């Protein structure tokens, strides 16, 4: 009798164990199905990267101290961004804008307030970029002086940020956003004696975007 009781207890444990395995399999199957549906929706909608354009760059100060290799600059840039997606919105949670010359940052980063960009929406920013006595590599300072003397200068306005995609009520995790916009500047000699050269932005440029 004692052996029968032991066998029955073992049999009941096996039944419970099988029940737990079935429940666990159902839960895993439901999770996999939900993830698969999200993946299908994601592949069908396929978010397209936002498009950026540098529309203007007004330079108010641009002084290179050579051979001290110090750069002071003040400029205002106008950047437009467009969401090309029909059904996907974009949350810009962090957007930092700064100036760069030959891959070296030459201004402090200016933060753009977070915002949401709806389907096909266009937004325009006009942040100021500042840099006071920013140390640059000696060869960069020399190159800047030479570019000024030649009357032509190529800077890059760069954007570093974090975005999220919104599809219906679903919101994705954060994605890193990096944008680089070429700014072609020309130096025109001042009309009066001793007047500093005027710095003019040449043309609207299309920016490269990595997400």
Image: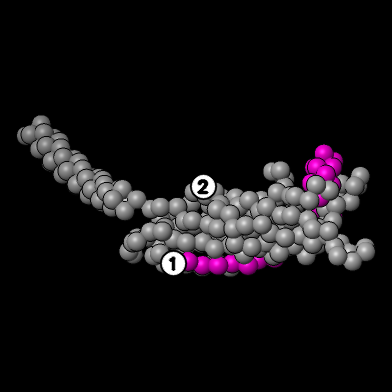
The image shows residue 200 at horizontal and vertical percentages of 72, 60
User: On the rendered image, what quadrant is the N terminus found in?
Assistant: top left
The quadrant in which residue 170 appears is bottom left
- Residue furthest to the top in view is 3
- Residue at figure coordinates x 62%, y 64% from the top left: 78
- The location of residue 56, given as percent across then percent down, is 64, 62
Between label 1 and label 2, give the one nearer the viewer: 1
Q: Which residue is mark 1?
A: 121
Q: Nearer the viewer, residue 113 or 17?
A: 113
Secondary element at tag 2? strand
Membership of 146 in magenta stretch: yes
**Magenta run includes residue 45:** no
Question: Of helix, strand and loop, which one carries label 1?
Answer: loop
Circle 2 residue: 210
Percent from the top left, x then y, of residue 205?
58, 54
Picture quadrant of residue 102: top right
Residue at 45% from the left image edge and 52% from the top image edge: 49
Q: According to the image, what is the colour scheme of the structure?
A: one colour
Badge 2 crowding class, 10 Å Cα cut-off, few under 14, some 14 to 19, many 20 or more, is few
Neighbours of disc 1 within 10 Å: few (<14), some (14-19), many (20+): some
């Amino acid at each position: 009798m004692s052996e029968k009781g032991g066998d029955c207890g073992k049999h009941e444990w096996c039944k419970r164990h099988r029940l737990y395995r079935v429940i666990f399999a159902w839960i895993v199957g439901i999770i996999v199905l939900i993830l698969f549906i999200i993946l299908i929706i994601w592949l069908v909608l396929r978010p397209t990267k936002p498009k950026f354009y540098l529309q203007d760059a007004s330079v108010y100060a641009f002084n290179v101290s050579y051979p001290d290799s110090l750069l002071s600059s003040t400029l205002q840039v106008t950047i437009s961004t467009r969401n090309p997606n029909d059904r996907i919105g974009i949350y810009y949670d962090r957007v930092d804008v700064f100036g760069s010359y030959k891959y070296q940052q030459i201004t402090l980063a200016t933060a753009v307030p977070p915002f949401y960009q709806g389907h096909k929406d266009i937004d325009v920013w006009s942040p100021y970029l500042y840099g006071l006595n920013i140390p640059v590599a000696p060869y960069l300072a020399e190159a800047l002086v030479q570019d000024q003397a030649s009357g032509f200068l190529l800077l890059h306005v760069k954007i570093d940020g974090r975005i999220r995609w919104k599809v219906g009520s679903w919101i994705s995790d954060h994605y890193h956003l990096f944008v680089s916009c070429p700014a072609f500047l020309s130096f025109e000699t001042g009309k009066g004696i001793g007047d500093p050269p005027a710095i003019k932005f040449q043309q609207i440029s299309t920016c490269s975007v990595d997400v």
